[in-house]
């Protein structure tokens, strides 16, 4: 900033030089005012008296040195103060208030030194806007330093969080490392947990947006990460926040399908639980917002865990039906699905499909002709049901697609 036309001279320069000569007294007065007016620096002792006076001296020497005409405006001192206060966790508003208190003390000293001298008072009035612009510039430099440090802390914390979560989910923890990971993630080192895996089918997308904040507001500890094709998390369950409550919350927030692992009681089991959650997610209805528990869908999970076998099963059992024209194929597939939903009750199937019972019998007989398997025979019905489930799970990868 070019200050050649606004730099003070005369009385202000002499008074600032005098204040520099008794800088220790000014530093003590500023420190006392800050400790009195700002609890963070006073009763709470978030900053040691020595550190407060050291920072005061650096900032006061920078301001007074400029007003005395000895140096250009420099922002190193306030920026450094911002860095240090952020590192110790002093709230930024408290830091800025302390800075304004120090600036006010300097201004009060200059007013007192001007006394009844009209020329000195006019000079002070003339450079007032410059002084407070200087204070604003220094405050901004302090804020910039503070925010830079906070941003770096957040990046560092995010890296530590991701590393700890990855270590748990890949099974690379034991002993002391387990406690370190739990602490980094804000999870209890002992308790009951589940792993959740969700996907929208879109790369690096949150399938459960805001779930971490929502759980935090409920007082529930959890740790989340978005991977290339999934949104995964470890959730700590409690007597009040049970797995059914979690499932309900996920169902409200999900914009994709999600899977929940079995409950486990040691964080060293998180990697196995992740596999369960991923399989449950894969077994959920493609393109849906379904939330599926691993323990509730073991057969679909088995099929999801062996996509090649599932594809072969669908192709082998349903091949002749899948080869039909689309309308005929979908009519027979829907009839079979409804058959199993209605436990093979012809009247119930007819009612669900809005057709005559004879139409249902005709379609079921046609299924038997095409597949060589009758839905009324337990073994054949099991093979067909599994093949239908395999085709559902495969979605776009199904053999007829």
Image (cartoon, rainbow, N blue to C red):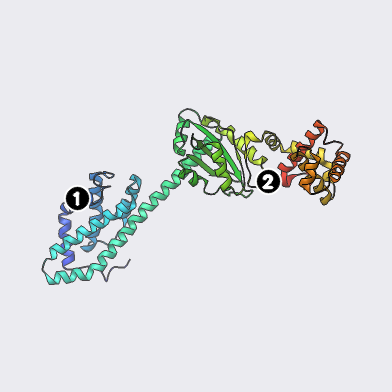
Q: Residues within 10 Å of mark 2 (few under 14, many from 20)?
A: some
Q: Position of residue 239 (x, y in %)?
A: 49, 34
State the SS at label 2.
loop
Q: Which mark is residue 148?
A: none
How many numbered marks appear? 2
Relative to the observer, which residue lies in front, 95 or 17?
95
Picture coordinates of residue 37, whole percent (x, y)? 23, 52
Q: Which residue is mark 1?
A: 32
Percent x, y of residue 263: 56, 32
Q: Quadrant of the N terminus?
A: bottom left
Q: Nearer the viewer, residue 4 or 312?
A: 312
Q: Kindly indicate the quadrant of the structure image that contains residue 318.
A: top right
Can residue 274 be seen here?
yes
Residue that carries the numbered disc 2 in the rendered image: 286
Residue found at the far left of this picture: 116
* Left or right: residue 127 compared with residue 18: right
Which label lies toward us, 2 or 1?
A: 2
Residue 136, percent from left and from top: 30, 62
**Which of the marked residues, 2 or 1, is nearer the chain's N terminus?**
1
Query: Which residue ends up furthest to the right in the rendered image?
Result: 369
Mark 1 crowdedness (10 Å alpha carbons): few <14, some 14-19, many ≥20:
some
- Gap in Å between the C-alphas at discs 2 and 1? 67 Å
Give me the residue at 26% from left, 67% from top: 130
Please, what secondary structure does the residue beneath circle 1 have?
helix
Q: 205 or 325, which is in the foreground?
A: 325
Q: From what the image shows, is residue 319 above or below residue 120?
A: above
């Amino acid at each position: 900033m070019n200050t050649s036309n606004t730099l003070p001279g005369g009385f202000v320069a002499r008074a600032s030089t005098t204040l520099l000569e008794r800088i220790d007294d000014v530093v003590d007065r500023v420190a006392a005012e800050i400790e009195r007016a700002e609890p963070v620096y006073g009763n709470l002792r978030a900053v040691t008296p020595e550190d407060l006076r050291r920072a005061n001296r650096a900032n006061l020497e920078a301001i007074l040195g400029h007003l005395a005409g000895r140096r250009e405006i420099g922002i190193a001192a306030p920026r450094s103060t911002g860095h240090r206060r952020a590192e110790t966790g002093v709230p930024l508003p408290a830091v800025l208030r302390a800075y304004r208190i120090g600036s006010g003390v300097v201004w009060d000293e200059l007013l007192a030194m001007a006394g009844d001298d009209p020329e000195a008072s006019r000079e002070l009035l003339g450079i007032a806007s410059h002084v407070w612009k200087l204070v604003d510039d220094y405050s901004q430099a302090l804020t910039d330093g503070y925010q830079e440090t906070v941003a770096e802390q957040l990046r560092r914390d995010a890296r530590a969080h991701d590393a700890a979560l990855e270590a748990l989910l890949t099974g690379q923890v034991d002993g002391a490392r387990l406690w370190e990971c739990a602490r980094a993630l804000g999870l209890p080192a002992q308790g009951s947990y589940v792993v959740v895996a969700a996907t929208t089918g879109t790369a690096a997308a949150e399938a459960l947006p805001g779930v971490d904040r929502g759980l935090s507001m409920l007082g529930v500890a959890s740790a989340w990460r978005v991977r290339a094709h999934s949104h995964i998390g470890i959730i700590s369950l409690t007597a009040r926040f049970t797995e059914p409550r979690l499932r309900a919350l996920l169902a409200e927030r999900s914009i994709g399908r999600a899977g929940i692992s079995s409950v486990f009681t040691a964080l060293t089991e998180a990697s196995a639980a992740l596999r369960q959650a991923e399989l449950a997610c894969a077994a959920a209805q493609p393109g849906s917002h379904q939330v599926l528990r691993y323990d509730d869908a073991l057969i679909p999970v088995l099929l999801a865990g062996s996509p090649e076998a599932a594809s072969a099963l669908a192709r082998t059992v349903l091949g002749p039906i899948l080869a039909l024209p689309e309308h005929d194929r979908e009519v027979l597939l829907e009839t079979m699905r409804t058959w199993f939903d209605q436990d093979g009750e012809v009247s119930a199937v007819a009612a669900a499909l809005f057709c005559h019972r004879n139409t249902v019998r005709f379609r079921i007989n046609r299924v038997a002709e095409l597949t060589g398997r009758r839905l009324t025979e337990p073994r054949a019905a099991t093979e067909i049901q599994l093949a239908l489930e395999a085709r559902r799970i495969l979605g776009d990868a199904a053999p007829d697609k």
